[in-house]
Image: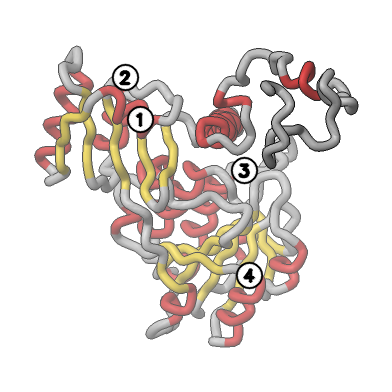
């Protein structure tokens, strides 16, 4: 008779004819409820789009901080790996006119050309710099948020000398200029220019809390950076001590020096250390100097710009050597 079959599997074990005696605990009803709209890709922590968004926000924050640096040294510039990019028509044309070395000049496709563009392309071609036409999207990537106006100049990473290289063949006329935490790249470039003018063997800077050989430093050096080496050291006071041990006489320049710089006897190998404007020489560097000298000034002036002070001091010391 239908419904009364005793075949195996024809009956539900543990269940009455009315269905399950144990409920689902509401799980079936909850399973039918919607979970709301799907979050955007950028809102999901592990999604690639979210990681890219976080990286872009970090870059934007870094660019904003760099562009507000005192002195404007970072404006129109950014770094990618070892290379540096100068972006914007004025910045590019000025860098090329100032003799800043470069690997390539990127110019936007179908750019609205003006005199700055024409002059930059001409200078690049005359100096053997590759002129490359690039789509706007590529220039946007290079500029990373900075206004490029259709132009970007790629500058190679500067190759610093080793600090001990400046000690080769030291004689009575040897001169090394060291900078104690001078952070403005234009000051660095101007000091390099003065150092080259007075026959220095090179310029020494610390690795931290110091300006580096950027496009602004190259431009301020007026080409002198191509003629004398710039060396970096992880510990300025220790390196100055090594120079002193090698027989060099260390003259520190500070506004409250023990004597006037034009009274220093300079007929020996010299290291001239220039302190930062305002703060002057750091304690350890000052302790490592054989003499700390100052530039005579009227009572109304507290200190000079580091590059100006360097130029005056080097002139006085050079005159002392030749007189």
- In depth, the one of 300 and 213 nearer the eye is 213
- Mark 1 touches mark 4? (CB < 8 Å): no
Percent x, y for residue 110?
15, 17
Q: CA distance from mark 2 to mark 1?
A: 8 Å
Residue that badge 3 annotates: 304
Question: Mark 1 falls on what kind of element?
Answer: strand
Residue that badge 1 annotates: 87
Of pointers 1 and 3, the one earlier in the residue sequence: 1
- In depth, the one of 49 and 312 nearer the eye is 49
Residue at 54% across, 87% down: 246
Percent x, y for residue 288?
70, 74
Of pointers 2 and 1, the one earlier in the residue sequence: 1
**Disc nearest the viewer among 2 and 4:** 2
Residue 88 seen in the figure: yes
Question: Mark 4 falls on what kind of element?
Answer: loop
Q: Quadrant of residue 290?
A: bottom right
Q: CA distance from mark 1 to mark 4?
A: 33 Å
Question: Mark 3 falls on what kind of element?
Answer: loop
Q: CA distance from mark 3 to mark 4?
A: 25 Å
**Disc nearest the viewer among 3 and 2:** 2
Q: Is residue 171 left or right of residue 97?
A: right
Q: Is 97 located above or below residue 255 in the figure?
A: above
Of pointers 3 and 2, the one earlier in the residue sequence: 2
Q: Is 231 located above or below residue 212 in the figure?
A: below
Residue at 72% across, 36% down: 6
**Disc nearest the viewer among 1 and 4:** 1
């Amino acid at each position: 008779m239908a419904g009364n079959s005793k075949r195996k599997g024809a009956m539900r074990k543990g269940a009455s004819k009315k269905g399950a005696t144990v409920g689902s605990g509401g799980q079936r009803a909850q399973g039918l409820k919607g979970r709301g709209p799907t979050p955007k890709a950028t809102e999901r922590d592990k999604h690639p789009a979210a990681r890219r968004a976080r990286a872009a926000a970090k870059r934007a924050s870094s660019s904003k901080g760099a562009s507000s640096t005192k002195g404007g040294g970072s404006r129109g510039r950014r770094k990618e790996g070892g290379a540096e990019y100068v972006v914007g028509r004025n910045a590019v044309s000025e860098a090329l006119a100032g003799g800043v070395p470069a690997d390539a000049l990127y110019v936007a496709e179908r750019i609205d050309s003006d005199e700055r563009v024409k002059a930059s392309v001409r200078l690049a071609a005359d100096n053997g710099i590759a002129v490359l036409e690039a789509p706007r999207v590529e220039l946007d990537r290079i500029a990373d948020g900075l206004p490029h106006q259709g132009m970007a100049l790629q500058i190679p990473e500067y190759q610093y000398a080793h600090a001990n290289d400046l000690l080769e063949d030291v004689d009575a006329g040897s001169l090394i200029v060291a900078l104690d935490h001078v952070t403005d790249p234009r000051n660095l470039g101007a000091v390099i220019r003065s150092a080259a003018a007075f026959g220095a063997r090179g310029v020494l800077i610390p690795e931290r809390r110091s300006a580096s050989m950027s496009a602004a430093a190259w431009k301020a050096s007026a080409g002198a950076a191509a003629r004398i080496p710039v060396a970096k050291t992880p510990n300025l006071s220790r390196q100055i001590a090594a120079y002193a041990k090698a027989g060099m006489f260390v003259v520190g320049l500070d506004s409250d020096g023990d004597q006037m710089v034009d009274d220093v006897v300079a007929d020996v190998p010299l290291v001239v250390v220039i302190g930062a404007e305002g703060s002057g020489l750091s304690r350890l560097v000052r302790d490592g100097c054989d003499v700390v000298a100052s530039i005579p000034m009227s009572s109304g002036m507290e200190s000079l710009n580091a590059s100006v002070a360097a130029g005056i001091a080097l002139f006085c010391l050079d005159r002392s050597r030749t007189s």
